[in-house]
Amino acid sequence: GENVEQHPSTLSVQEGDSAVIKCTYSDSASNYFPWYKQELGKRPQLIIDIRSNVGEKKDQRIAVTLNKTAKHFSLHITETQPEDSAVYFCAASGRGGSNYKLTFGKGTLLTVNP
Amino acid sequence: ETGVTQTPRHLVMGMTNKKSLKCEQHLGHNAMYWYKQSAKKPLELMFVYNFKEQTENNSVPSRFSPECPNSSHLFLHLHTLQPEDSALYLCASSQETGGGTEAFFGQGTRLTVV
């Protein structure tokens, strides 16, 4: 089945700096790669996603890049703010049995220091 | 609100108890999921239901028993749990179209087994 590795596990940046989180996946058939943000005590929520027919996608301060050949994708947050502090999860959607399912990385705890 | 509601929010149970977790989605989705979130494995898929049919059981012990009576409701029946089963149990739903889509999460049930 799919295996998703995520690095780093913790990341601390100063407000205004950029943050980059990287993920690799194992199943070359995976075709959907979402990123979720989970604030303390809250549910995971989608912040951006990308499909395999696209190499890059941007939404204001957040961007995601995908390299299908190397099987890795990254989340880029620019001009970080304290409210960006949270745990970020990457995921890859591959076919498991008769259903597509999301396999998540282990998460990155991002701390933005004021 | 994401349209996925879980009850109860917190549950403390003894190892010999039987309890059930409930999840309800009002999004018209055709797939529902149970995830276990703990410090060791941040987002671990347990079960997948598509159109009420179980399509995935990710090697979950039989003391966890899912039930999906219709496309809007999902239960997780718990019986003779172990302290290591203490975790946050998250329900999610999505509209599966054959290529992977956003999963919407409930707020979770914080389970403590004593």
Image (tube, coloured by chain):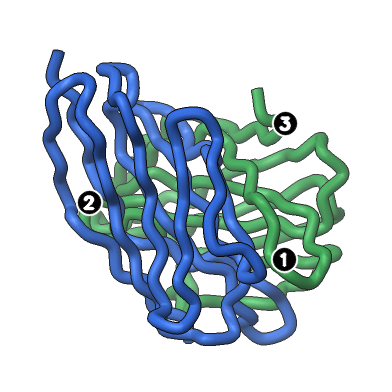
Q: Earlier in the sequence, mark 2 or mark 3?
A: 3
Residue under label 1: B49
Q: Which sits earlier in the primary sequence, circle 1 or circle 3?
A: 3
Residue B11 in sight from this viewpoint: yes
Q: Quadrant of residue A62?
A: top left
Subunit of label 3:
B
Q: Amino acid at mark 3?
A: Gly
How dense is the environment of label 1, judged by Cα within 10 Å: few (below 14), some, or many (20 and up)?
Answer: many
Compared across the picture, whether B107 is left or right of A101 comes to: left
Q: Are marks 2 and 1 in contact (CB under 8 Å)?
A: no
Q: Which residue is the site of mark 2? A: B39
Residues under numbered marks 2 and 3 in contact, where contact means CB atoms less than 8 Å apart:
no
Question: Residue B3 has which mark?
Answer: 3
Whole-number angstrom distance, CA of label 1 to CA of label 3: 17 Å
**B95 lies left or right of B111:** right
Q: Colour of chain B?
A: green
Q: CA distance from mark 2 to mark 1?
A: 25 Å
Which chain contains the residue that carries disc 1? B
